[in-house]
C-alpha cells in the first residue's frame, strides 16, 4: 500500500468509508465524495478488519 500519495492533478479529496446494508449482503464501501463515480465496494464478510490493517 502506498503511503506517500498525491491526488490526481494535485487536488485534494474527501475519502470516506461506510457499511451499506442495502439489498443483499452488507458491503464495505470506500468513496471519494469530492468526485463523481469514485468508489469501490466489497462484501463486508470479505473486507479486512481494523486489526488486519495494523
Image (spheres, rainbow, N blue to C red):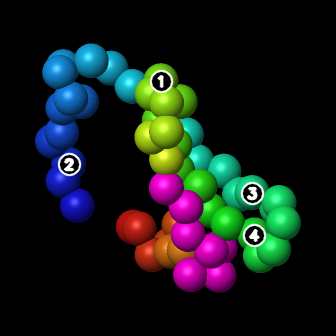
Q: Front-most of 30 and 36? A: 36
Q: Residue at x 62, y 74 (%)?
A: 43
Query: Would you say the residues marked 3 and 4 are in contact, meaning their CB atoms lie under 8 Å apart?
Result: yes
Asked if residue 17 shows in the view, the reply is yes
Query: Would you say the residues marked 3 and 2 are in contact, meaning their CB atoms lie under 8 Å apart?
Result: no
Q: Residue at x 77, y 76 (%)?
A: 25
2 with respect to 24 (left or right): left
Of marks 4 and 1, which one's residue comes earlier in the chain? 4
The residue that disc 3 covers is 20
Q: Which residue range is magenta in the image? A: 40-46
Q: How far apart in space, not on screen, are marks 3 and 4 (Cα)? A: 6 Å
17 with respect to 10 (left or right): right
Pointer 2: residues within 10 angstroms few (<14), some, or many (20+)?
A: few
Q: How far apart in space, not on screen, are marks 3 and 2 (Cα)? A: 27 Å
Residue 41, position as x, y percentages in the image: 55, 61
- Residue that protrudes farthest toward the front in the picture: 37
Which of the labelled discs sits on residue 34, or is there none?
A: 1
Amino acid at each position: 500500500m502506498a503511503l506517500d500519495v498525491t491526488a490526481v492533478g494535485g487536488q485534494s479529496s474527501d475519502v470516506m468509508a461506510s457499511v451499506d446494508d442495502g439489498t443483499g449482503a452488507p458491503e464495505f464501501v470506500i468513496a471519494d465524495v469530492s468526485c463523481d463515480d469514485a468508489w469501490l465496494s466489497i462484501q463486508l464478510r470479505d473486507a479486512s478488519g481494523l486489526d488486519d490493517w495494523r
